[in-house]
């Protein structure tokens, strides 16, 4: 729960857009409160435009917010706003204008989910105008802020950001007295329509009725870029509890699915649930936030992605979109460390402590370079230079690597290997590409291009090689397993092995896979009956057993239900597992099809979608009703 203390436009006022009646229950009573200046946390946001680099290299024109008073510096999503329970947040948004001449750029006062009505529009701010409001954080939880144009236009253009209220006193609890957690991630989920953004850049007003997204993002990134983003790549150890804050200010629903683990839904729209709901898939509707708590009970690498196939594409190319990973280490592994460096800066941190670098990191030809001497010192390795041939030797307990400046060839324990980019010298210091740090030192490297930040997670004595020969074969699995399904399946192959360079190879024609077969790089879509075979092979030549999954695709029948102005007909139906039920609007009014547990929720309306479909895969009875006309009820019995 959050409450408004005051709102003031230096020539303007405040409220928000909405797409779904289901968010109406978010509205909370507003009461005037008195605050002291010392209790107020002040944030200044500057409304401007910017560019977002998409995973295929294209750039998308955006509107948004920046912490910098400079046109063209908007970030997507907007800056994370964080306070604790009981704090008062004073946030000011100032219209500083767009960098791109001729763009159709509009700025409105901010709204906050959980306070503001989901309908009605604010008065736009003129260039140079500011709007300030105060919010008191009563209940810890996940929320978001957004542009108050009343139609969601600014939200699609990028004008939204996460707002998180934490437990008082920096407790690692979801709320005071709530469940504990070890790590926390904020996932701001959205979808992007390039045609809409191009129209705005060209100075035109886009028709929202033509909305057709082509990219889907978590924290402004899509697969495969998500796997290099430490904010969006979940990392932990067996036994740890991970809090993930899922935030969806957009137009589309996203069913988020975690492989290898179940999780608990502990809060919805900033409101704690009376009882946690155990799931492996949670539906994130437009305008919703949901907090989930994951307890890691097994090690390995597991996908976390949307169960909508289209959400996993980049401009129609699969895989992409809403697909990230969880990396889980064994509980007995030694405590890790983190160093954070910034492009162009000699300031860095190691486990939160400030340190200085001799040479700042830089980028060259798409590769990021960091000072190798500093990296060696943190990892516990020894770096020595030989003047006679200008070679470098990097030693750890079990490995020795020889490197030469400007050369991609190197020697690892006497064996020739190939680097992706060469070692360089700058100001007399050795600079190594981060690809070397990850591939040959096996530290986990995350690079955030939007903030020019590099995060390296490592352990003292970090190295890739073990003291003895590797004779352990990998273990490979598939999710979902082979079986009979009523629709296309997105199959994720996973590998567990001590060798981080171990790979999966597969075939889809029933032949035995080898190292010359297709290399697995992402989810496999199976839309017809297919025999999938796969094998894991590490760099020592150890191979797993060949695994086989036969996927039989048999489309299920569709059952139709008419939605009249006052009833569903037939109201009560019986179907078999895998059946898709479609509700068709036959009247003149808007209705919803909403299950009492909230899992199924669709809108049908005369001027919008006139059909809503849902596939029932579990046996049991699902009772539903219309949120607009609660006397309209029905049920689906799955046998």
Image: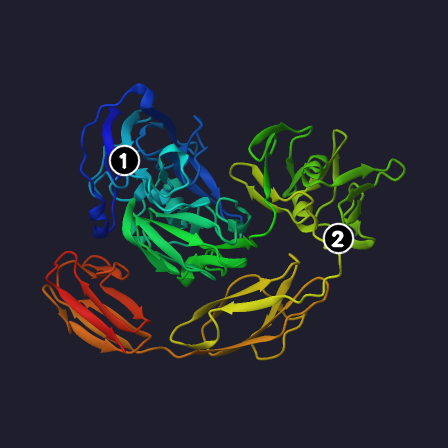
If you read the primary sequence from the N terminus, does the residue marked by circle 1 or circle 2 appear first? 1
The answer to whether residue 96 is visible is: no
Crowdedness near tag 2: few (<14), some (14–19) or many (≥20) residues, C-alpha within 10 Å: few
**Quarter of the picture holding the C terminus:** bottom left
Measured as percent of width and height from the top left, residue 515 is found at 68, 69
The x and y percentages for residue 113 are 28, 41
Q: How many marks?
A: 2
Give the residue furthest to the right: 388
Q: Nearer the viewer, residue 285 or 250?
A: 285
Secondary structure, mark 1, is loop
Q: Residue at x 67, y 51 (%)?
A: 439
From this viewpoint, is residue 459 visible? yes
> 255 and 383: which one is in front?
383
Q: Quadrant of residue 125?
A: top left
* CA distance separating discs 1 and 2: 56 Å
As drawn, the residue found furthest toward the top would be 37
- Quarter of the image holding residue 505? bottom right
Callouts 1 and 2 close, C-beta under 8 Å: no
What residue is rendered at 81% in x and 55% in y? Answer: 415
Check residue 173 in the rendering and tell me which mark sits there, or answer none.
none
- On residue 138, the disc is 1
Q: Which percent across, then down, holds residue 522? A: 54, 61
Q: Is 527 left, or right, of 515 in this rendering?
A: left
Image point 32% across, 24% down: which residue? 40
| Quadrant of the frame with the N terminus | top left
Residue 274 drawn at (x, y percent): 26, 51
Q: In the image, 74: left or right of 453?
A: left
For label 2, the residue is 418
Q: Viewed as shown, does residue 337 lie left or right of 411?
A: left
Q: Residues within 10 Å of mark 1 (few under 14, many from 20)?
A: some
**Image position of 609 with respect to 366: above or below:** below
């Amino acid at each position: 729960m959050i409450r408004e203390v005051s709102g003031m436009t230096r020539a303007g006022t405040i409220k928000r857009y909405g797409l779904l009646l289901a968010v109406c229950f978010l509205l909370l009573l507003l009461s005037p409160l008195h605050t002291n200046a010392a209790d107020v946390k002040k944030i200044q946001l500057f409304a401007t435009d910017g560019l977002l680099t998409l995973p295929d290299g294209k750039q998308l024109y955006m509107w948004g917010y920046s912490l910098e008073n400079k046109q063209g510096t908007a970030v997507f999503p907007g800056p994370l706003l964080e306070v604790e329970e009981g704090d008062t947040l004073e946030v000011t948004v100032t219209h500083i204008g767009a960098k791109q001449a001729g763009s159709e750029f509009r700025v409105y006062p901010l709204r906050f989910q959980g306070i503001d009505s989901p309908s009605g529009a604010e008065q736009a701010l003129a260039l140079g105008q500011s709007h300030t409001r105060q919010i008191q954080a009563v209940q810890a939880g996940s929320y978001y802020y957004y542009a108050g144009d009343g139609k969601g236009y600014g939200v699609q253009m990028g004008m939204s950001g996460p707002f998180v209220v934490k437990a008082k006193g920096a407790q690692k609890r979801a709320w005071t007295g709530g469940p504990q957690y070890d790590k926390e991630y904020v996932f701001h989920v959205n979808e992007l329509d390039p045609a809409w953004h191009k129209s705005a850049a060209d100075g035109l007003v886009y028709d929202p009725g033509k909305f057709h997204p082509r990219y889907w993002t978590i924290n402004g990134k899509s697969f495969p870029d998500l796997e290099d983003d430490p904010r969006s790549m979940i990392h932990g150890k067996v036994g740890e509890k991970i809090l993930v804050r899922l935030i969806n200010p957009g137009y589309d629903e996203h069913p988020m699915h975690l492989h290898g683990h179940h999780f608990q839904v502990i809060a919805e729209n900033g409101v704690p649930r009376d009882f946690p709901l155990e799931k492996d898939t949670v539906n994130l509707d437009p305008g919703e936030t949901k907090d989930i708590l994951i307890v890691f009970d097994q090690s390995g690498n597991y996908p976390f992605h949307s169960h909508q196939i289209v959400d996993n594409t980049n401009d129609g190319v699969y895989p992409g979109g809403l697909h990230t990973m969880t990396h889980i280490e064994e509980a007995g592994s030694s405590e890790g460390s983190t160093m954070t460096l910034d492009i162009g800066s000699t300031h860095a941190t190691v486990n939160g402590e400030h340190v200085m670098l001799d040479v700042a990191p830089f980028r060259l030809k798409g590769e990021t370079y960091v000072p190798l001497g500093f990296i060696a010192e943190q990892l516990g390795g020894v770096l020595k230079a030989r003047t006679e041939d200008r070679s470098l030797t990097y030693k750890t307990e079990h490995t020795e690597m020889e490197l030469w400046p400007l050369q991609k060839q190197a020697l690892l324990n006497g064996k020739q290997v190939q680097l992706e980019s060469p070692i360089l010298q700058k100001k007399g210091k050795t600079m190594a590409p981060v690809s070397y740090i990850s591939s040959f030192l096996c530290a986990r490297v995350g690079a955030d291009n939007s903030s020019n930040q590099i995060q390296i997670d490592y352990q003292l004595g970090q190295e890739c090689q073990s003291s003895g020969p590797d004779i352990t074969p990998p273990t490979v699995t598939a999710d979902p397993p082979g079986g009979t399904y009523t629709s296309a399946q997105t199959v994720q192959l996973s590998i567990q092995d001590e060798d981080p360079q171990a790979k999966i190879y597969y075939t889809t024609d029933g032949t035995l896979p080898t190292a010359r077969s297709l290399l697995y790089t992402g989810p496999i879509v199976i839309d017809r009956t297919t025999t999938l075979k796969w094998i894991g092979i590490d760099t020592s030549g150890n191979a797993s057993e060949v695994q086989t999954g036969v996927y039989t695709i048999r489309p299920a029948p569709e059952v139709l239900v008419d939605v009249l102005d006052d009833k569903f007909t037939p109201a009560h139906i019986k179907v078999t597992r895998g059946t898709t039920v479609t509700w068709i609007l036959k009247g003149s009014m808007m209705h919803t099809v909403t299950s009492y547990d909230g899992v199924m929720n669709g809108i049908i309306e005369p001027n919008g979608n006139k059909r809503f479909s849902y596939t029932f895969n579990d046996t049991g009875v699902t009772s539903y009703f219309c949120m607009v006309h609660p006397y309209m009820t029905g049920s689906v019995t799955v046998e």
